[in-house]
Every structure is written in structure tokens, then in C-alpha cells.
Amino acid sequence: MKPIKVGLLGIGTVGSGTFKVLQRNQSEITRRAGRGIEIAMVADLDVERARLLTGGACKIVNDANLVVTDPEIDIVVELIGGTGIAKELVLKAIANGKHVVTANKALLAKFGNEIFAAAQAQGVMVAFEAAVAGGIPIIKALREGLTANRIEWIAGIINGTSNFILSEMRSKGLAFDTVLAEAQKLGYAEADPTFDIEGNDAAHKLTIMSAIAFGIPMQFEKAYLEGITKLTAIDIQYAEQLGYRIKLLGITRRTEQGIELRVHPTLIPAKRLIANVEGVMNAVLVKGDAVGATLYYGAGAGSEPTASAVVADLVDVTRLHTADPEHRVPHLAFQPGSLADTPILPISEVVTAYYLRLRVADQPGVLADITRILADASISIDAFLQKEPAEGEKQTDIIMLTHLTVEKRVDAAIAKIEALYTVLSKVTRIRLEELS
Ligand code: HSE
């Protein structure tokens, strides 16, 4: 059978990895897919570089429109990124009856509902394994491997840049800004790192996993985002003394009231496997009712790890493209007519535990006032740490871990605590998950 023809939009880091992996493993990939997979066309603004990378093996153009409209092309691989031109091209490819493979998490988290509806109407596939956690086959696991389960929750370290920064802050006791500068020097963080360190990138990935896990539409706009920029080395140290590590987690959980969809720094017990995921690596913990907890670990970015996911999607599409669309795995794991309208909970309604750090005057009655406010709010203390005041100082840090509490109650209690004249600065509040 003649090879299936692929058009690549963008031959940067992931595109060149895709080209290399397809070439290097061509014979095994063909044996798996049942026919060859050939990159027949590449669109890139840097035509010369694209020519060098592909060694004249395929047609190079600088206008991506020529790829998405070319009748020879069966599958379009979108690796441009962003939600501007990439969205136009993906929709145009679908309208032209092409299957699409994309690594674009922002595009799917924000416009996935529109894109999947268009694909459904055209009877084409949109595959996106590379959009979440790079080379880790988490989409395949959630959509197919765990399909027997009622998924209860997912917690993931899904941004390598942030995880690298937090790992370095913990192991070297350095400040956030110092480590960010180092990460930029090493090429782990972008010149503008906002999307990584403020939680946007993780929230895009979490939105996609949540939709697949619970059979709901993509609802990125309802996700709660809090990044790592305000974390201090001292909180990382105190957490460690209490047996916890701080990670930027994406958490989505099904509750009776609705679905939690939140990205924020989180204390997790140091003894959990996921707490020991360090550097730029990613890991996703999924709790299913039948299987229990399962953990997926690997490279969340990089040329060939991400290409691994792109090529897996190319093989899937190649195997299934002649199948009746009704018999393919639905884009969001659940049949399109069976998506649920379960609400996404606002952060104020989320139930979790908390780490609280208070800077207080070291004088009688301070602790009594604070614990009275917590008791009146029915917030139960799980652990407590008080530091000795530094030499000659009359103030100190108090650290408390609470049991599970609804967030709005903690917010109200913190406001009252901050109003005490013996509490000398704003309360540091970090959420805590046992992940048990
Ligand atoms: N910038 C991401 C990270 C990888 O740091 O994990 C691509 O989503």
C-alpha cells in the first residue's frame, strides 16, 4: 500500500524530532501502522533551514495554506503553537477533509469544543497526545487504558519549567528569581516565562485531561490558576521539616457538588512517589475507582520525547483513517452526545487542607487568639510548628497545617487573623493534598 502523506506545519524543535524519529524508525513504524508514513510537505517560514533539516526529502513551502489545501495530504501535523494562525489552519485543514495531529494545548483548551465539533461534522480525527505531558502517553491511558473506570481525580506535575525551579529552590535553598535566571540560561525557561510560571501552561493541559477524564467540554476559562512566583525558599524549608514537598500541581477532582479544576503550588507528602519527581520531568497521578492510583512519569517536553507522542498519533490515525468515524475512539473519550454539564467549582468551594505561615509577635496570648479564630470557623489543626525567635528578635514564625476545610472558610478566618495587631504580616497560605 502506498504511504500515507503527512504535511508538517512548522519544523522547529518538535517538528525536526518528528522528522528524525519517523526516518530512524521507519521500518518498525510501517510494520505497526500497516503502511508507510511519509512527510511529503513541510511549511516553515525559514525555508532554508527546513531544507537542511529534511535533506531535500520533501516539498518545502513557506505558506502553510498550501499544505492544508493540498489534495495529496492526508494528515496535517500542526506544530506552530498559539491560538491565532494555528487555529485558522487547523480549521481549514479539517474543512478540507484532513486529519489533524497537534501538540497545541492552548488551542485545544480554549477552542477544543469548536475544533472537535468541526472534526466530527467532517468525519476526521484530531489527535493530541503531544499536547499533554510531552512524551508520556497520558491521553491514551485516560481515553482508552482506563476506560473501565469512573475516574475520581487526577493530580499532575505537568510543567517542567516550574518543577525545575521548585526542585532547585528546595535542593539549593535559592530564591525564586535566582533559579528562574538559571533556568533561562540553561534554556529550560523561555525569555518570557509567564505561561510556565503563572500556571497557564499547566492549566491548558489540565483542562484537556479533565475533559477526557470526566466527559465534560473543555472549560479553560473556569480553571483556577496560581503560579509559583510568590513562593519563598523559607516555605519550602518549613514544608520539608513537616514532611512535605511543594509542587506546582494541576488537580482535577470529581465531587458531589461539581468538578474541581485548579493549578497551584501544593504541599504533598514527601514520601509519595510523585513528590520525588524532580527537575524538568513530568508525572501524572490518576485515581480510578477500579484500578486505584496509577502514576505516569516521563519527559514532558523536548524534541524527540514530544515527537514520540506525535508519531504515536500518526500511527493511530493511519490505522483508523479508513474506519467508519462512528467506530473510532471519540475525541474526548465519551461519545459527543453524552458529554455532561457538571459544573466546574469556583475555588472558594474547593475542599482541601492548608499550610499557613504567620509572622507574629512573641508574646502571651497570640496563639490563643489565632486558634480561637480557627476553632470558631470549625477549622481543625493537624500539625503545628513554632520557630524560636532569632537572637534579639521579639517576633517569630508559626506554621500550621489544617485538616480539610472549604476554601471560603479559610479565607474568612485568615482575614480575621490578619486583623490581629499581634500578627505582623500577611498570612502565607498554600494548599495541601495528601494524595492518598
Ligand atoms: N513549557 C512546558 C514546560 C513544555 O515547561 O513543561 C511545553 O508545554
Image (tube, rainbow, N blue to C red):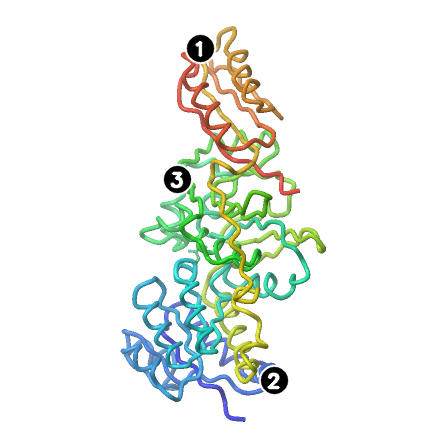
Q: How far is mark 2 from mark 1, CA to CA?
A: 73 Å
Which class describes the residues within 10 Å of circle 2: few (<14), some (14-19), or many (20+)? few
Q: Mark 3 or mark 2: which comes first in sequence?
A: 2
State the mark number for residue 229.
3
Residue ID for mark 1: 394
The residue located at (57%, 24%) in the rendering is 379
Can you tell which of label 3 and label 1 is closer to the viewer?
3
The residue at the point 40 percent across, 85 percent down is 73
Gap in Å between the C-alphas at discs 3 and 1? 29 Å
Q: Look at the picture and state if 188 lies above or below 329.
A: above
The x, y position of residue 337, in whole percent, is 53, 66
x and y percent of residue 107 in the render? 39, 62
Q: Is residue 45 left or right of residue 112?
A: left
Residue 18 lies, in percent from the top left, at 46, 74
Looking at the rendering, the quadrant in which ligand 1 lies is bottom left
The residue most toward the bottom is 1
- Looking at the image, residue 84 sits to the left or right of residue 428; the answer is left
Q: Is residue 150 above or below residue 46?
A: above
